[in-house]
Amino acid sequence: MKLRDFELGNIDLVIGEEIYDLHNNFDFRGFCYDVAARELTLRWTRGVGEWIPKNSPSEIVLTVCLVSHLSCSPRDAEMPYTEDDCLNCVSFVEPNQATDKSFIVSGPADTDLHYVFQFMSGFTLRVQADEAVCQVS
């Protein structure tokens, strides 16, 4: 998947010189998949902790276009629901491997790899697509 004008790290979203910590400073609000458009949208909002920079954007939206793979793994029933909105990490997996074989990369990821969004509750979202764009507001 080609990322247009941004990068995704382990927990960070990077746009130019700006680094947004999606684990500590933003709360995941959910995702929506438009079947006809093959478009996945993931949405985060700024958290409320006093450690969060005041100039942080109020919302970050990732739009993943022309999805070729989308799957998810269930949350851990033992975890509190408050862990559903906290990103644990973004990792990667080879297309032919199981999601639990995901790994962290430093630097840009190979465009053939699947992205795995892992949340503190154990929920995982796995996606592969042509490209992704990011909107910060």
Image (tube, rainbow, N blue to C red):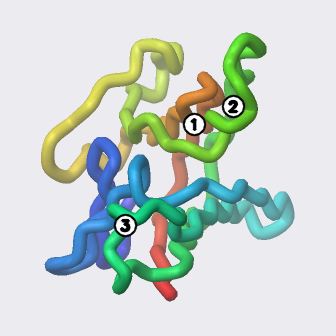
Report how far apart the C-alphas of labels 1 and 3 lie in the structure.
Answer: 28 Å
Could you classify mark 3 by the number of other residues whose Cα lies within 10 Å: few (under 14), some (14-19), or many (20 or more)? some
Residue found 46% across the figure and 75% down from its top: 134
Quadrant in the picture for the N terminus: bottom left
Report how far apart the C-alphas of labels 3 and 2 lie in the structure.
Answer: 29 Å
- Camera-side mark, 3 or 2: 3
| Residue linked to disc 2 | 72
Mark 3 or mark 2: whose residue is earlier in sequence: 3
Residue found 42% across the figure and 59% down from its top: 25
132 vs 109, left or right, is right
Image coords of residue 12 (percent x, y): 31, 55
- Camera-side mark, 1 or 3: 3
**At numbered mark 2, what does the secondary structure look like: helix, strand or loop?**
strand
In the rendered image, which quarter is residue 35 located in? bottom right
Residue type (three-letter) at the residue carrying disc 3? Ile
Of the numbered discs in the image, which one, if any, rests on residue 52?
Answer: 3
Whether label 2 touches label 1, CB < 8 Å: yes
Looking at the image, is 16 positioned above or below residue 90?
below
Looking at the image, is 10 positioned above or below residue 130?
above
| Residue linked to disc 1 | 126
Image coords of residue 135 (percent x, y): 49, 81
Report how far apart the C-alphas of labels 2 and 1 lie in the structure.
Answer: 6 Å
Image coords of residue 17 (percent x, y): 15, 78
Whether label 3 touches label 2, CB < 8 Å: no
**At numbered mark 1, what does the secondary structure look like: helix, strand or loop?**
strand
Residue type (three-letter) at the residue carrying disc 1? Arg
Residue found 36% across the figure and 74% down from its top: 4
Residue type (three-letter) at the residue carrying disc 2? Cys
Whether label 1 touches label 3, CB < 8 Å: no
Viewer-side residue, 97 vs 61 = 61
